[in-house]
Image (tube, grey):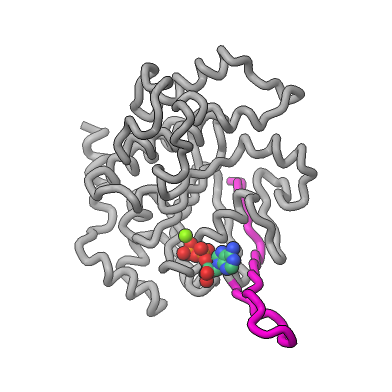
Amino acid sequence: MSDLLQVQDLVREYALPREHLFKPPGKVHALNGVSLSITTGRSLGVVGESGSGKSTLARLVMALDVPTSGSVHLLGRDLHQLPPAELRAARRDFQMVFQDPYGSLDPRQTVERIVTEPLQAQTQAQGQATRAEQRERAAEVLSQVGLRTSDLGKYPHEFSGGQRQRIAIARALITRPRLIVADEPVSALDVSVQAQVLNLMQDLQQQFGITYMLISHDLAVVNHLCDEVVVLYQGRIVERGAPAELFSHAQHPYTQALVGAVPQVQPGRARARRAAAKAA
Ligand code: ADP
Ligand code: MG
């Protein structure tokens, strides 16, 4: 099987504010040489504590930030080497869902505007859809996330937290992406709503063959959706494996601490239950 995403030796340093005029500025090594790949249709979980470099990795994979060194290949293209117009066109293949559905949706825009926004980036030359086609497509993705066509004219404040995250997922779906990077997509939601959103993401994966890179500080969340997990610690991958393996024999002390933080989780149970329900 082919790799959809290949991340090679990714490094991102940030300059710290200079403390003294005659001293060189310090640096934060947010990412310290991260390599990973994701096979089409599979999903990778990225876990790690706050400050471990998860969002930096997400921004680099989404080409929203530039690496200090290293590369990101999606469908064989080196994203950080593409000319601007080609990168803009390539963006239809990868979309992002952010943590905070309150902050990431413009409160002054209608759901229709919000959801069709990624289509505006596609230029005329690439066959930009007409307004009517865009509306039709928006209605389609809304129904795919469990919302209604009548929601198109509403504003974000008219929805619950879980519904807003569904709107954010609809916006990500509208370009029919191959990869969705979700950075803490359920962290701001109540636990009962978290499962609904994760189940939706799983259904969409089965329906459309979407590949996820799912970022979370919570191992239980990635266990729900991912075939493989990498553990980030201080900008490096310190461990990788299937979620169940990490739960049963975590090698790195940091992973053991993460597993210890979710004692109530029984790996594979939710997945087995869903499989049983589908078979019945
Ligand atoms: P996480 O998402 O795992 O919490 P981040 O990727 O946001 O971690 O941050 C990793 C490290 O890089 C942290 O030490 C953070 O303070 C630093 N960092 C992130 N973005 C910037 C930035 N724009 N400028 C300076 N430092 C940054
Ligand atoms: Mg983060």
Q: Quadrant of residue 9?
A: bottom right
Q: Is residue 10 left or right of residue 229?
A: right
The x, y position of residue 160, in whole percent, is 29, 36
Number of numbered callouts drawn: 0
| Position in image of residue 235 (x %, y %) | 54, 71
Image point (35%, 20%), residue name: 148
Q: Is residue 267 above or below residue 176?
A: below
Q: Which residue appears at 71% of the width and 86% of the height? A: 23
Say if 133 sits above or below 246 in the image: above
Please identify the quadrant where the C terminus is shown: top left
The furthest residue to the front: 21
Residue in front for this viewpoint, 126 or 152: 152
Residue pictured at 47% horizontal, 43% vertical: 104
Viewer-side residue, 19 vs 202 = 19
In the image as oriented, which residue stretches furthest toward the top?
132
Q: Which residues are magenta?
A: 1-29
The residue sitting at the right extreme is: 83
Which residue does the image show at 36% across and 65% down from the upper left? 245
Q: Nearer the viewer, residue 234 or 160?
A: 160
In the rendered view, does 179 fall on the left or right side of 248?
right
Q: Does 20 appear in magenta?
A: yes
When asked about the image quadrant of residue 12, the answer is bottom right
Image coordinates of residue 154 in percent, x first then y, are 39, 24
In the rendered image of this protein, does residue 174 appear above or below residue 50? Answer: above
The verdict on residue 92 being magenta is no
Residue 49 in the image, given as x and y percentages of width and height:
41, 68
